[in-house]
Image (cartoon, grey):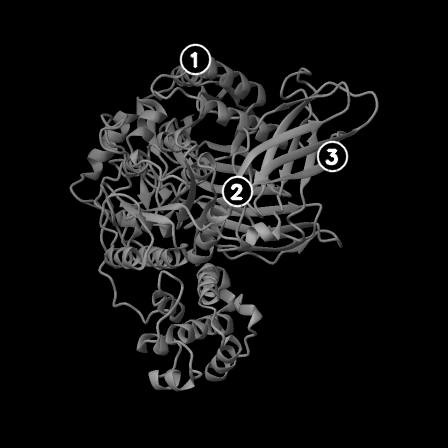
């Protein structure tokens, strides 16, 4: 059936009451506070209840929720989830207005907001505040993302919630989304703000002081909210370690988390250059690629190019395998194989044939399959996961990675708009690896190669954090122990400071670790006097960190919650005012409250979705095609699902459609860099073949005749490839650096006596002036 309307869709096609969204962001160094205001209006002739399901960053701490009706403002309280739901229902049945905000039990980055009993003609303004840490990107930028898309979660067959009626979160073409968005950000830091970039159009950056440590930026007018709003913020000297001490809440009891000062420590370990330039010649590299329908087109082609670079960059002597998944999963080899010319060629042939034809996004089974394989002695397992999706069982997937965190490191890549931040960040955090997001026009290759460099770094082991504070002060760690440290990556540590010192006001923290057998340490002095006017941002992030680590302490049987843990989480959540899976925000307008006349109409607010849901590209007014699904029936099912509460609703959102496979256009002319890379041998060398000459832009005769006499053909071909990379592709060096190191290492092993002549002849042929030293010889 075709659907060709927008708004709060019901069988009778009534309009949506959400009019506009305003977002204000305050970024302080590497922490953001976000205030979103949603403005509703009931234009119908009967009272309505609107339900708005929306995404937030997976590690956000929701810390304030209030509603304004007319001139009256009501502020929500955090209560145990079941109590909050009962209070909401009671309020509605007694004619009071009520608002309920709750987090999904399956995934911590999905929230549902119920706006209860909005009378005809009435407006309501709802304000939601959350705090979040900003992740460091490959180029040292800090990434803030305001998600625009709620992709349908893929609910695995037979999993919890699948017996509940299928629910459709109403989706409309982004161009028809009936509400507007305004967005502004204020950035401040002890270090100057060098620039702010975005995939969306921004008004120019406005500096607020001459030191350029404070600035504001706005989204250009007319943004359709048809994609994530992503900001990349760059500071000068971003890698300085810092410590912020924040005063407790005056009204809270000393000795409690909110009553005591909290310190947030930001560490950037710097490792010795000698260790960093050596690449571990071993490891088991398992690559897991999403081939669900939504990956079709450019995403899939980019992923295949990335696998080419990865496979060419692996060290001789390591082991590898490639798995791919959708509703089912496949592997190239029954178990990981040793890396050689033969196995590399076989893998590349299979990768070349891959298409996005495996249906949904069922990631749990291939992960279980990978973990069931015994580890190879002295070959540390490194797992690379590529997905553009979201799953309904995020917590189950992350728990599985955590249970296997002792045997591997997990590096994750979120591809395209709408990849679940809870899933991507959770995989890397629990797997002791690193997460990357690839959106808009980002090239996947540099980010993936950066993670491969991390994976090839020697693992940091025996990490310990020691606090030296004056007598009378004690320190309680609030963050889980650090399991992974990488060069140039930030680690955040939160701790509660209890008691007072009579004298010294300084503390010292020492982080010790062992790297490639060398003991090492980083130290940071900090002042115990709390910074003024920081709000309670650090406390709330610390509470969120503690809540999250307690939630992860669920028993292995995830059906059976540990009651003690649950009680502690509820206590912490209520005390700090920060959301958790066991609590919800409830606000009731205890006004005059007459009994509601007539039935309460429930509405679902549409969320913009696009290609990642397998929709075809749309022109304005185009429609969404659903196979074998009566949309009006789906709406009725949605109403049935309402009684199950939010988790019943979210637990049953599925891909109701077979994701389309798009007819591929003719292959464009291959990128010369990838053409050259594809010819490299597993050992690191190149052969003197016509395809190499073509990739270098020369004829076979020109290449052959320029070869110095007495030089082996493979040595000459390898020199030419290296000179071409350094001479014409320096802007992409982070993509080919590892395979060039392998080539240089192969050349050194040949003990070729003609290096200087080869470099001179190669430069003359290709028209470059590359120095021999630059080639790593």
Above or below, 345 relative to 336: below
Helix, strand or loop at label 3? It is strand
Provide residue 330's location: percent of width, then percent of height: 23, 45
Label whose residue precedes the other's in the sequence (1 or 2): 2
Q: Nearer the viewer, residue 678 or 526?
A: 678
Q: Which residue is mark 3?
A: 526
Label whose residue precedes the other's in the sequence (3 or 1): 3
Helix, strand or loop at label 2? It is strand
Q: Of discs 3 and 2, which sits in the foreground?
A: 3
Q: Quadrant of residue 540?
A: top right
As measured in the structure, the alpha-carbon distance from the residue carrying label 3 to the one carrying label 1 is 38 Å
- In the rendered image, the quadrant that contains the N terminus is top left
Provide residue 317's location: percent of width, then percent of height: 38, 52
As measured in the structure, the alpha-carbon distance from the residue carrying label 1 to the one carrying label 2 is 39 Å
Q: Which residue is mark 1?
A: 563
- Numbered badge on residue 22: 2
Residue located at (38% from left, 28% from top): 49
Estimate how packed mark 3 is, as few (under 14), some (14 to 19) or many (20 or more) residues with alpha carbons within 10 Å: some
Above or below, 316 relative to 559: below
């Amino acid at each position: 059936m075709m659907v060709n309307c927008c708004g709060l869709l019901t069988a009778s096609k009534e309009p949506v009451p959400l009019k506009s969204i305003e977002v204000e962001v305050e970024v302080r160094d590497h922490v953001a506070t976000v205030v979103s205001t949603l403005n509703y209006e009931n234009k119908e002739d009967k009272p309505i209840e609107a339900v708005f399901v929306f995404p937030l960053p997976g590690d956000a701490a929701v810390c304030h929720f209030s509603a304004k009706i007319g001139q009256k403002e009501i502020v929500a309280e955090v209560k145990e989830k079941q109590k909050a739901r009962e209070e909401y229902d009671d309020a509605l049945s007694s004619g009071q207005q009520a608002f309920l905000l709750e987090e999904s039990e399956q995934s911590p980055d999905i929230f549902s907001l119920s706006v209860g009993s909005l009378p005809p003609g009435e407006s309501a303004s709802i304000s939601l505040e959350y705090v979040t840490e900003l992740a460091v990107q490959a180029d040292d930028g800090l990434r803030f993302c305001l998600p625009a898309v709620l992709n349908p979660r893929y609910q695995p067959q037979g999993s919890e919630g699948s017996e509940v009626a299928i629910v459709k979160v109403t989706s409309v073409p982004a161009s028809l989304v009936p509400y507007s968005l305004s967005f502004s950000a204020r950035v401040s830091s002890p270090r100057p703000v060098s620039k702010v970039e975005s995939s969306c159009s921004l008004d120019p950056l406005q500096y607020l002081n001459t030191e350029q440590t404070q600035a504001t930026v706005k989204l250009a007018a007319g943004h359709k909210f048809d994609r994530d709003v992503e900001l990349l913020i760059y500071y000068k000297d971003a890698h300085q370690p810092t410590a912020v001490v924040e005063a407790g809440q005056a009204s809270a009891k000393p000795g409690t988390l909110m009553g005591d000062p909290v310190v947030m420590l930001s560490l950037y370990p710097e490792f010795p250059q000698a260790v960093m330039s050596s690449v571990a010649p071993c490891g088991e590299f398992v690559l897991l690629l999403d081939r669900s329908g939504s990956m079709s087109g450019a995403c899939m082609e980019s992923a295949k190019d990335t696998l080419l670079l990865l496979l060419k960059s692996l060290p001789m002597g390591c082991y590898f395998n490639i798995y791919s998944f959708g509703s089912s999963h496949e592997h190239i080899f029954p178990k990981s194989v040793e890396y050689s010319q033969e196995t590399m060629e076989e893998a590349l042939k299979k990768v070349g044939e891959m298409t996005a034809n495996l249906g949904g996004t069922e990631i749990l089974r291939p992960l279980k399959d990978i973990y069931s394989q015994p580890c190879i002695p002295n070959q540390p397992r490194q797992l690379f996961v590529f997905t553009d999706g979201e799953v309904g069982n995020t917590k189950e997937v992350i728990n599985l990675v955590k249970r296997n965190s002792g045997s591997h490191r997990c590096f994750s890549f979120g591809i395209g708009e709408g990849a679940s931040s809870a899933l991507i960040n959770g995989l890397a955090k629990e797997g002791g690896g690193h997460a990357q997001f690839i959106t808009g026009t980002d090239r996947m290759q540099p980010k993936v190669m950066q993670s491969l460099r991390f994976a090839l770094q020697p693992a940091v082991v025996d990490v310990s954090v020691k606090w030296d504070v004056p007598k009378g002060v004690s320190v309680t760690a609030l963050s889980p122990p650090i399991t992974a440290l990488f060069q140039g990556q930030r680690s955040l540590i939160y701790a509660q400071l209890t008691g007072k010192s009579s004298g010294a006001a300084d503390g010292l923290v020492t982080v010790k670790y062992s790297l490639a057998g060398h003991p090492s340490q980083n130290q940071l002095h900090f002042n115990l006097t709390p910074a003024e006017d920081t709000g309670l941002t650090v406390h709330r992030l610390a509470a969120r960190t503690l809540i999250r680590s307690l939630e992860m302490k669920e028993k292995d049987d995830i059906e059976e919650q540990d009651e003690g843990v649950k009680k502690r989480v509820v206590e912490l959540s209520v005390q700090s005012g920060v959301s958790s899976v066991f609590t919800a925000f409830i606000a009731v307008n205890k006004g005059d409250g007459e009994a509601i006349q007539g039935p309460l109409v429930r509405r679902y607010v549409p969320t913009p979705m696009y290609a990642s849901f397998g929709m075809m590209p749309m022109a304005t007014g185009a429609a969404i095609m659903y196979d074998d699904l009566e949309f009006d029936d789906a709406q009725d099912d949605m109403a049935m699902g309402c009684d199950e509460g939010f988790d019943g609703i979210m637990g049953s959102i599925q891909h109701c459609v077979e994701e389309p496979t798009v007819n591929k256009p003719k292959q464009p002319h291959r990128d010369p860099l990838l053409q050259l890379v594809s010819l490299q041998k597993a050992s690191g060398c190149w052969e003197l073949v016509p395809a190499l000459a073509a990739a270098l832009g020369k004829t076979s005769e020109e290449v052959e005749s320029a070869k110095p006499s007495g030089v082996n053909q493979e040595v000459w071909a390898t020199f030419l490839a290296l000179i071409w990379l350094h001479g014409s592709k320096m802007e992409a060096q982070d993509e080919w650096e590892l395979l060039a190191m392998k080539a240089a290492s192969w050349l050194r092993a040949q003990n070729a006596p003609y290096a200087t002549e080869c470099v001179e002849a190669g430069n003359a042929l290709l028209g470059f002036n590359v120095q021999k030293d630059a080639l790593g010889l």
